[in-house]
Amino acid sequence: MEDDIAVDPDYYILNEDHSPEDFNSETTSLASEISKGRIENGRRYQSMKENDYWSPADEQQFESLENGHILCLVLDHHQKNPLHRAPISSSPKHILDIGTGRGSWVIDMADSYPSATVRGVDIFPPPVSWMPPNCVFEVDDILREWTWRKPFDYIHIRILLGAFDDAGWSLAYDRCYKGLEPGGWIEQVEFDINLHSEDGSLKPEHHLSSWGKNMIACGQRAGRPLTTQSTMKAAIEKAGFVDVHEHVYKVPLGPWAKNDLLKEAGRVNYLVWTSGLEGYAMWLLTKFGAPEPWTKEEVHVFLASVRKELSDPSIHAYQYVRRVWARKPTEEDSKAKGETKTPEVDIKVEK
């Protein structure tokens, strides 16, 4: 079963309405050695392996992730629980968040579902000083063999563009499939880094117009695809999940939309970009820029131009955000179809 992707045409009309002032637990496992990280171009990166992840793990990037968390809550504020779309039970027991970042989603879910142990796992520890007693943070690589003893009712993934290569994503979804209870749900939210405009205000000569194409090309050269939002649905289906749903949001970049909700979403999205811009670009451009890797100074000059465009109220840019959720089949599903699941095959990933 599949939801219609088309959004309410009246709700998502991106008319402009701008003014310049619009811009004005069980246990806690935190690895202190990893938290030290490594420093490149003035930004801190996790330290498990140099090529583990292209995005920094420092306070500036955590600010961008927090803004991303708030943006998702704004977009789904009308849902019964804006933290997820998957129809999980009212009293789940075990929940996992992969790529937990700052940990805000995990903390909010632990508050929402006191019956559950909510685990957040990442390759670097989140900067948290307090958490609910049913909240657990762990530093680990989810591509390694999972050692959790209890299967999960629900697994959540968000903003992990570039986290893995194609084989890594296949392995990640396979791990999720095996780690879920029959009938359990997986849900993923990813942002499209390409920008668009409906009124022609985003012109070909703008840096924002070519931003997505440039970053995607760097990601391809790095072996870290930045197009996950367009491939995750098919990959989740391929892993064996059923009852797959998809919802696409149209999110303004900046507070130029007339609709109050979209104006607020655009304002928050502007903060996502301005707080995360350097972190998105620095590693990719200094290592995989074309025609040759850029210098740190060249990146800073480029980003100054991008920031100027971001603050230009005459540019009415928007991007897509995609949410996919799907269920692990039960024995009843297989019996109803007269099928059995294809035997699972181990997937090897180049380290």
Image (cartoon, rainbow, N blue to C red):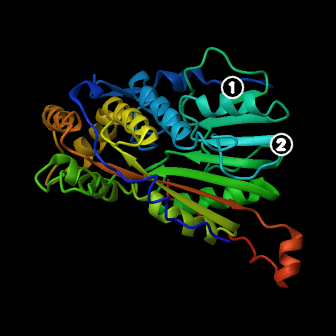
Residue 124 in which image quadrant: top right
- Using residue 325 as the reference point, say whether residue 336 is left or right of it: right
- Using residue 65 as the reference point, say whether residue 269 is left or right of it: left
Residue 105: x and y in percent read: 62, 34
Q: In the figure, 82 relative to 202: above or below?
A: above
Q: Residue at x 49, y 51 (%)?
A: 190
- Using residue 28 as the reference point, say whether residue 127 is left or right of it: left
Q: Is residue 241 visible?
A: no
Residue 193: x and y in percent read: 35, 51
The residue beneath circle 1 is 29
Residue 142, disc: none
Q: Residue furthest bottom?
A: 338
Q: Is residue 10 visible?
A: yes
Name which of mark 1 and mark 2 comes first in the sequence: 1
- Crowding near the residue tagged with mark 1, few <14, some 14–19, many ≥20 C-alpha atoms within 10 Å: few
Amino acid under disc 2: Ser
Give the mark count: 2
Residue 84 in which image quadrant: top right
Q: In the figure, 192 relative to 5: above or below?
A: above
47 or 214: nearer the viewer: 214
Amino acid under disc 1: Ser
Q: Disc 2 on helix, strand or loop?
A: loop
- Image quadrant holding the N terminus, namely bottom right
The residue beneath circle 2 is 90
